Image: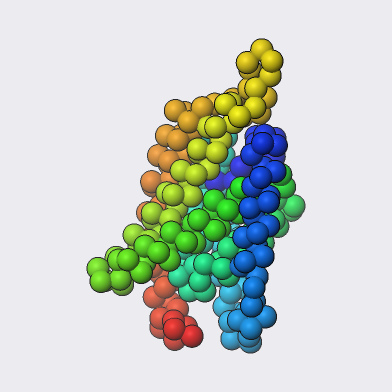
Amino acid sequence: MHIPDGFLSPQTYLPAWGVAALAWGWAARGLDRRLDETLVPRLAMLTALAYALGLIMLPLPGGTSGHALGVAALALLFGVRLAFLAYSGVLLLQALLFGAGGITALAINALALGLVGAAVAVGLHRLLARCGETAAVAIAAFVSLQVSALLVALVLGLQPTLARAPDGSPLFFPLGPEITVPAVLLPHLLIGIGEAALTVFVWRYARRKGWLGR
């Protein structure tokens, strides 16, 4: 659900870059102590999966694209901070190599998909732990994707209000939230089922391999 360049006003992406810079600094603290010879290959494998998922995009009329993320799997296995950093790298590479997303929109995409998506997944998984492992993982992944999609839709839908020409016409993205929210959220309800199934598969694989709790 990448937002491309040219859709966001400076009033949106400049503050987002400031917030993202602080978030990246927070996420990188103590990184050298966490990365070791066992964690790095696992993180690289799951990051590559997220990268591949992000390239299988379904164009949506809300000015974005729909696809599974893999952020929930990253977050549940490696934590919010590593998931945020890893997915930020995914977004940067996709923007530079394939034009998926954009550089000006990178901060918004990283915050909405990487940071918020990861935090929602981890928080819900902990909250629902008593409901059973499979249910907790699946619901966490599904809801994580929906929250990220909603944030992207709202950011796009606010653009006509944030930046207008003297004659009142939108300077950047022209559609309001009454269009962007259903256009982005409805397809992601279906995509979320696939995201949940994939995350459960990855979680079970990690459990069989003994990765959990390490």
Q: Residue furthest left?
A: 131
Against 124, residue 206 (above or below) is: below
Write down the quadrant of residue 45 in the picture. bottom right
Q: Is residue 114 left or right of residue 193?
A: right
Q: Is residue 128 left or right of residue 156?
A: left
**Percent x, y of residue 97:** 74, 53
Write down the quadrant of residue 4 in the picture. top right
Q: Nearer the viewer, residue 26 or 38?
A: 26
Q: Is residue 199 at least partly visible in the picture?
A: no
**Percent x, y of residue 168:** 63, 15
**Percent x, y of residue 157:** 53, 32
**Percent x, y of residue 174:** 59, 25
Q: Residue furthest right?
A: 96
Q: Is residue 122 left or right of residue 18?
A: left
Q: Is residue 175 at least partly visible in the picture?
A: yes
Against 41, residue 28 (above or below) is: above
Could you tell me which residue is drawn at 58 percent across and 70 percent down? 82
Could you tell me which residue is drawn at 54 percent across and 58 percent down? 115
Q: Residue furthest top?
A: 167
Could you tell me which residue is drawn at 52 percent across and 74 percent down? 78
Against 156, residue 122 (above or below) is: below
| Colouring convention used in this rendered image of the protein | rainbow
Mark count: 0
Could you tell me which residue is drawn at 50 percent across and 44 percent down? 151
Q: Is residue 203 left or right of residue 164?
A: left
